Image (cartoon, rainbow, N blue to C red):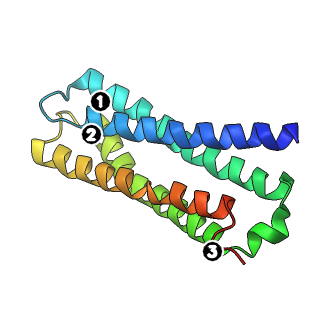
Amino acid sequence: MLTEALIAYVHLAAVLALVVFSTSQAALLRAEWLNAAVLQRLLVVDRIYLGCLAALLLSGLLRMTLGVKGLAWYGAQPLLWAKLLGLALLAWAAVAPHRAYARWAAAPALPSADEVARVRRQVMRASHAMLLIPLLAVLLARGLLTT
């Protein structure tokens, strides 16, 4: 029981951290604020964000395999597969900003305001879409729309 509670805590902490570091990226992605130091911070925040995605996936897999409901129950739930699809889409959405940050760091000059705004919009879309995953989690936890 304690193990399941601790895994649930790590899972929730990963969700909250994902929100924090997604918000941090969006806040830093302002052309008028972007300089070399902010770009370095953005690279760090991006790595932490990717780590949060990995922690979320790993803790979720641990909940499925070590939790009370078990792998067979979770595996039969369409809401779980919808959550995993949502997480996969978040990971996919993180690729373009990640590549942009690496490109900017390697370039001799800072990116244009238009490029910063484009990447910021990508981050904002992912940040807003991520809100659907906890809704699916709550429905799953309450046994709504489950098989």
Which is more foreground, mark 1 or mark 2?
Answer: 1
Query: What residue does disc 2 label?
Result: 104
In this picture, is 106 found above or below 142?
above
Q: Residues within 10 Å of mark 2 (few under 14, many from 20)?
A: some
Q: Residues within 10 Å of mark 1 (few under 14, many from 20)?
A: some
- Cα separation, mark 2 vs mark 3, equals 45 Å
145 or 96, nearer to the observer: 145
- What amino acid is found at the position of numbered circle 1 in the picture? Leu
10 or 112, nearer to the observer: 10
- What amino acid is found at the position of numbered circle 2 in the picture? Trp
Residue 65 on image: x %, y %: 83, 57
Query: What residue does disc 3 label?
Result: 145
Q: Quadrant of residue 125?
A: bottom left
Label whose residue precedes the other's in the sequence (1 or 2):
1
Q: Are marks 2 and 3 in contact (CB under 8 Å)?
A: no
- Cα separation, mark 1 vs mark 2, equals 8 Å
Marker disc for residue 95: none
Query: What residue does disc 1 label?
Result: 39
At 34% from the left edge and 27% from the top edge, which residue is drawn? 40
Residue 32 on image: x %, y %: 12, 30
At 36% from the left edge and 49% from the top edge, which residue is drawn? 99
Q: Secondary structure at mark 2?
A: helix
Quadrant (top left/top right/bottom left/bottom right) for the N terminus: top right
- What amino acid is found at the position of numbered circle 3 in the picture? Leu
Label whose residue precedes the other's in the sequence (2 or 3):
2
Q: Secondary structure at mark 3?
A: loop
Q: Secondary structure at mark 1?
A: helix
Side of 44 where 1 appears, left or right? right
In this picture, is 13 found above or below 133?
above
Q: Residues within 10 Å of mark 3 (few under 14, many from 20)?
A: few
